[in-house]
Image (cartoon, rainbow, N blue to C red):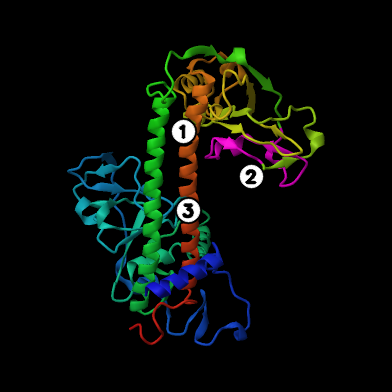
Amino acid sequence: MAERSGAVEQQAVRDGAAFYSVEPEIATTEDVPPGYKRTEVGVIPEDWRLCELRKLLSAPPNYGINAAATQYEESLPAYLRITDIDNDGRFSPDPPVSVKHKSAHDYFLNTGDLVFARTGASVGKSYEYKSSDGRLVYAGFLIRVSPDTRRLDPTFLSNFCRTEHYWNWVRSVSLRSGQPGVNGAEYGSLLVPVPPVKEQRAIATALSDADTLIESLDRLIAKKRAIKQAAMQKLLTGQTRLPGFAGEWETRRLGNHVSFLKTGTNSRAELASNGRVAYLHYGDIHVRSSVTLNPNAVTTPHIAASKVRHLDKLAPGDLVFVDASEDLEGVGKSVEIIDVPKEGMVAGLHTIAARFDKDVLADGFKAYLQFCPQFIGTLRRLAAGTKVLATNWQHLASVEMELPCVAEQQAIAAVLSDMDAEIETLERRRDKSRQTKQGMMQQLLTGRVRLVKPGKAA
């Protein structure tokens, strides 16, 4: 089995992140390999069945309890709502809540149960219950299905409900009523390609092993982020000093040590994937996880040089802030430019571009200014607006904060940058593991690769 799983993984890597497609096939019968058949969900092995989900369950789909959430208590069961299921189908409450209701015991999930979101933007999202998640009561906007394990392996079903075929089906069914929603009867009509049970379990085991690796990387990334957060709290406030540094930090008013660059107002519609000048839109700062930006190493929007000739070109070391945010977390978000393209780069719509004196703020350290309590605290206090919180250059210039000498700033930046690099390496490894799993799903859930020989899977 291990050798076969390794072969599947190698094939998955070659396939990349391609998903199992449910688009109608128009190929002729000559395209169907020997031992396979054409069905409504595509080409599958001859010994697989195509079956409605309702015929593979031990009971009809059930709706959850309609009860209010309460503050979490260990003596009460945890409450599972749509928002508590993450994009990987895991129970991930933030924060956890409980439910207190006289009928709660009727809605406990059991090992092997799956729940599906039945309405709203998350319709189709699913979760397979794990006993390690504790006692869970599922809420009213979820539908429980309980596979008959003699005919359908729950983990096989859970992985099938992450394929492109499944999501195309959700989109098709949910739009019939004009608003997102799939009811219990409709979930029961879902067509599932069903291998013999032994093969289902072999497929589920292989994909679960891939999930275990991804989950372990997620936990390690979260741990490294927590360590970095603690380090920033101490290093950026002087609570912890790096070896070789001592003495008081000096209070500086940033407005005395900065010049602001002229930025653009061009909308996203004016940008293109190619052009003469790279363009930094505020939306691209909001979604960026890295605190630095090298436009030569990542894909960035561009704009015609004639539209931005009146703007100041960015230079390495410049710090570009967003000037608007929908929440406090986004106030003061910025990226430090560490390189620029040959044709130049400009800061655009809803940005503030600042060029600080390098003998006051060191290159590299500026990227972490947004995490300094005195800096971000001032900006959040001054942010104005109702639906959108605004920051302007006067706010930035008014900040007074204690800063270490440039040499200590450089040392702090080096420590934090190394932490960021380690986290980014782990994130790339996790993303590659996800890509590999998607390739495995494409091979295994369509029967293109068999883990159990046909006729031996009963």
Whether the magenta-drawn stretch holds residue 134 is answered as: no
Spatial separation of the CA atoms under disc 1 and disc 2: 22 Å
Q: Earlier in the sequence, mark 1 or mark 3?
A: 1
Amino acid carrying label 1: it is: Val
Spatial separation of the CA atoms under disc 1 and disc 3: 22 Å
Q: Residue tagged by mark 1?
A: 415
Q: Residue tagged by mark 3?
A: 429
Image point (61%, 15%), residue name: 257
Whether the magenta-drawn stretch holds residue 289 is answered as: yes
In the image: residue 386, left or right of residue 189: right
The magenta-colored residue range is 266-295
Quarter where residue 339 is shown:
top right
Q: Residue tagged by mark 2?
A: 297
Q: Quadrant of the C terminus?
A: bottom left
Instruction: Mark 2: give few (<14), some (14-19) or many (20+) Cα within 10 Å.
Output: few
The front one of 138 and 22 is 22
Amino acid carrying label 2: it is: Ala
